[in-house]
Amino acid sequence: MIQLRPIYVICLREFIKFFREKSRLLGTLARPVLWLFVVGNGMSSLIKPQAGFSYLQFIFPGMIGMTILFSSIFSSISIVWDREFGFMKEMLVAPISRLSIVIGKAISGTFISVAQAVIILVLIPFLGIQITFMQFIEVVAVAVLVSFCITSMGILIAARLTSFDGFNIIMNFLVMPMLFLSGAMYPVTSMPPALRHLTQINPLTYGIDAFKHILLRNGTPPLGPEFAIVLDLAVVTGISVIMLTLAALSFRRKE
Amino acid sequence: MPIINVNNLSKKFKSLTAVNGISFSVNEGEVFGFLGPNGAGKTTTINILCTLLSPTGGTATIAGHDCVAEPDAVRSAIGLIFQDTTLDTGLTAYENLKFHAYLYNLDRKLAEKRIDEMLEVVELTARKRDLIKNFSGGMKRRLEIARGLLHYPRVLFLDEPTLGLDPQTRSTIWEFINTLRQREKITVFMTTHYMEEAENCGRIAIINNGKIIAEGTPAKLKEMVRGDIVRISTEDDRKAIAEIKGIFNIAARNENGGLFLETERGEEFIPRLIHSLTMKTRSVSLEKPTLNDVFLKLTGRTIRDDVLTDDKEVTREFVRSHRRAQR
């Protein structure tokens, strides 16, 4: 059911294309820099540092989450491109299982997101945060988990999108709300109840909270982590499994 | 033992019956063609045979494997060249072929050997490391053919293989296909709505509104329609009409300053005709019926009534390139 060589070559294709498209890499890196230093610095004058952490430091875990969110969605939406331009047919008529295609896409999307998240970490010295090597490893591990979760979700959506026109709808009605309702820019506990409930069903919230646990060690709400780390990891893992299963199932469907 | 066996196959999409109980079989090594206008059910049939669609009724087997029950066995046995290009334009020729080789589980050494071999065949060796986005339409088609043959399929499916290509490229592509076919002894199943292209087939099924309405060799099909038309002009046409009536019992008509008559096997008839006539002949021409005449006779319309399809194709291409540019 799972074939390694097809999975390997599907991943290889995504990596080659990722490194060939310099503009995409630049775009994903420019966005967090803009948020951090323009929005972050602007907001810092309004919000006083609390429990030893400034607003700028507070939004950094959120920026890692944002980078993963955009990168993972973009990777998985490439399935819609593949379908639109016919390349998907090349995979669908090959003697490989649908599950292999889904896994290949999920692994490649995850790796690309993690790579970008790691690149974002070079900004750490500019923020006055210090991390140990162990913390770095923890960030990477959580990044793998969160990237896998969001990529699987993206694949599930992409499997159901019939044309590229749906992409804008996804961006405006799913990706942007997911970013704003994730605790990336403002603490979850300070939100009005309606928004807080939406935030609590967003998997990205828990991913970003896990990053806060690692990077804003000893921080307390509102600017520190707001949920238990065990809950964070359990939610992200659980949703990953559900999303990937649903994605694989929706791929099997044929008319 | 036929390599493709289709029995009473049908496919319904909600209210539309795209394929309506068709049956046919194709023998190993044959070039079998589906000829019909757009929307006749050609692509739907191919999609069922290559396991992309499930039929609503009937059965289809390829190389002894059922297209529904054993999709992987069928997929390994077939190669496909689709109507629209399915190459990744962001990859090089080599990368596209390597991707294919790995999907079909060729080991690395064999893959490298086949890639070089196929690039040689389609004369793209020099462009091995070039990105597909810089390829012309004809080059893309050739590369797709190379890719479709990379895993040595037993049956090659060609869905409108030369759609949108200029006549010269079209004939080059056919030279390739014919050479390859003889060398690799593969069976070819193709669809087309170009009459000239259908002439490349050993056997043709004419499909209209989801049904096969005629089947046979191109020559056989054309014989159904009418005889050949011979046009002849002589020094004394009036006398010639009488002589033709007397000797061959054929009624020739005077038309546009020449004689016009219908007969069977025109190429054999002409020498006899010239030999028999007592006056000198000025010119002779022979007109064979075309597959379009066959289609016209069977359906009451020509196959290219929908000439707009080419424009539609251009529009589709345009929309795509436009979107691509926006990316």
Image: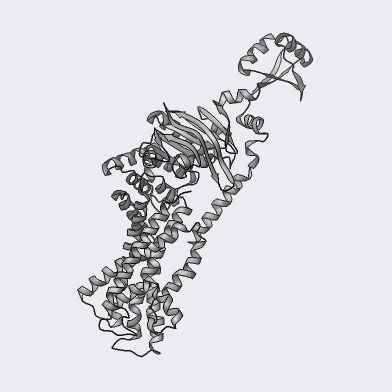
Outermost residue toward the front in this view: B57
Q: Picture coordinates of residue B82 (x, y %)? A: 47, 43
Q: Quadrant of the N terminus of chain B?
A: top left
Q: Picture coordinates of residue B3 (x, y %)? A: 42, 30
Q: Is residue B230 above or below residue A178?
A: above
- On the question of residue A19 being in view, the answer is no
Residue at the spot x=29%, y=49% of the render?
A5
Q: Picture coordinates of residue A161 (x, y %)? A: 48, 59
Q: How is the image coloured?
A: one colour
Residue at the spot x=45%, y=72% of the render?
A176
**A106 or A113: nearer the viewer:** A106
Instruction: Please identify the quarter of the rendering in which residue B157 is found.
Output: top left
**B105 or A221: nearer the viewer:** A221
**A202 or B183: nearer the viewer:** A202
Q: Picture coordinates of residue B203 (x, y %)? A: 52, 28
User: Disc count in the image?
Assistant: 0
Q: Is residue B297 above or below residue B74?
A: above
Is residue A115 left or right of B58 when viewed as pictured?
left
**B101 or A139: nearer the viewer:** A139
Q: Is residue B244 above or below residue B70?
A: above
- On the question of residue A120 being in view, the answer is yes
Is residue B293 left or right of A73 when viewed as pictured?
right
Outermost residue toward the right in this view: B238
Instruction: Please identify the quarter of the rendering in which residue B19 is found.
Output: top right
Residue at the spot x=68%, y=34% of the render?
B300
